[in-house]
Structures are given as structure tokens and as C-alpha cells.
Amino acid sequence: MDSGHSSGPLALKIVVAGGFGVGKTTLVGTVSEILPLRTEELLTDLSVATDDLSGVEAKTTTTVAMDFGRITIGDDLVLYLFGTPGQDRFWFLWDELALGALGAVVLADTRRLADCFPSVDYFERRGTPFVVAVNCFFGEQLHTPDRVRDALDLDPEVPVVLCDARDRESGKQVFVALVEHVLTVSRRS
């Protein structure tokens, strides 16, 4: 039915989740076509006992609420990206950030793969379609997508993609994979 005017592109909410220091803020900022909203604060001596910096010793900031960005996939599709904080003490925010989300990206670091289990479990429990994006820091690919899938005990239909969160094109492909996965899941329903 044509109403005589364009309602604009379809806008979809996407959540980017994963463990502490995995690259969520970097991914959202890299692909966002707008200046991303970031709620980062400096790590202080007070967080030493709380935040495990193993593998990310050079990290100096942490997201305390969310990251927000926007990416246009095509003339008719815009994604609004909501990055979650990674530490357990901020998980109370996840339900609000995930409310109404069409899908999610679980960002994984194979140096600390266990850190993404809570994100995988969260989206599986909610029935939210998701992809696992393995952030290959400095070009390091420690494990193949199949090995990551096995280690995380993912259902065979959950896509596992390799990416570099610092590279715009690589990051965009993660979101394209998610949209394709969401479409596949919705056709099966």
C-alpha cells in the first residue's frame, strides 16, 4: 500500500556485547557514520581488584553505560548500534540495552574466549539471533571459526566470522552477516 510519501529507511536496533576489553567500543566507533556516543571512564587503582586486565594490560578506560553509533547498510536499512559494558557489575544495563533489539553481535577475543560465554548465554536465553565475531587483534587468528564454534558449543546455524574491530570494512561485514542471519532465522519462523 503506497501512502504517497516515504517513511524513510528501516531502522533496526543491534546490540554489541562481549567480555571486558574485547573491542566493543572500538567496533562501534569504527563503523559508525556519526560521532559515536561513548560512556568511557578511566580505569583507576580502585578497579584493580575488580577488573581483570589479563591480556589487556594496556587498557586505560572502560565503558560504564553504553556505546552508541549508527551505520547505513543500504538506502533502505539503518542499524542503530548499542555497545554493552563488559564487566559483570554493569550487566544490570543489558536488559534495557537489549530491549527491542533485532539481533546481536557477540565480540570474542580468542586469547580470553571464556569471557564471551555470558554474552552467548544471554542471547540464547532471550532467543535473540546473534553472530559471534572473532576480533583478530593485530592480525592474530589463534583459532579457526569452526574451533571457536566448538569451544563455545554454538548451534550450527550461529555464524562465526573473523574481523578486525579497527577496520571499517571488516566491521561492516560483521553487521552484514548479522542482518543476513536475522533474515534467515525469520524466514524459518
Image (cartoon, helix red, strand yellow):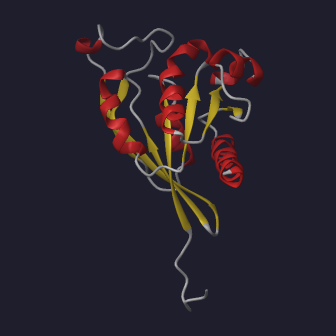
| Figure quadrant of residue 133 | top right
Nearest the camera: 80 or 168? 80
Q: Residue furthest front?
A: 189
- Residue drawn where x is 29% and y is 7% of the image: 49
Instruction: Give the x, y percent position of residue 164.
Output: 65, 32
Give the camera-side residue of 42 and 97: 97
Front position in the image: 79 or 26: 79
Q: In the rendered picture of this protein, how many numbered marks are placed on residues? A: 0
Quarter occupied by residue 2: bottom right
Side (left or right) of 189 relative to 36: right
Residue 102 drawn at (x, y percent): 53, 50
Q: Is residue 163 above or below residue 54?
A: below
Up-down relation of residue 183 to residue 116 (above or below):
below
> Which residue appears farthest toward the left when viewing the image?
46
Image coordinates for residue 27, horizontal then vertical, percent: 54, 38
On the rendered image, what quadrant is the N terminus found in? bottom right
Compared to residue 27, the image places residue 99 above or below, namely: below
Q: What residue lies at 64% left-to-right and 45% top-to-bottom?
A: 178
* Residue 140 in view in this figure: no
Describe residue 75's horizontal placement relative to residue 89 as left or right. Answer: right
> Can residue 120 be spotted in the picture?
yes
Image-quadrant location for residue 85 = top left
Compared across the picture, whether 87 is left or right of 183 comes to left
| Residue 19 higher or lower than 45, as above or below | below
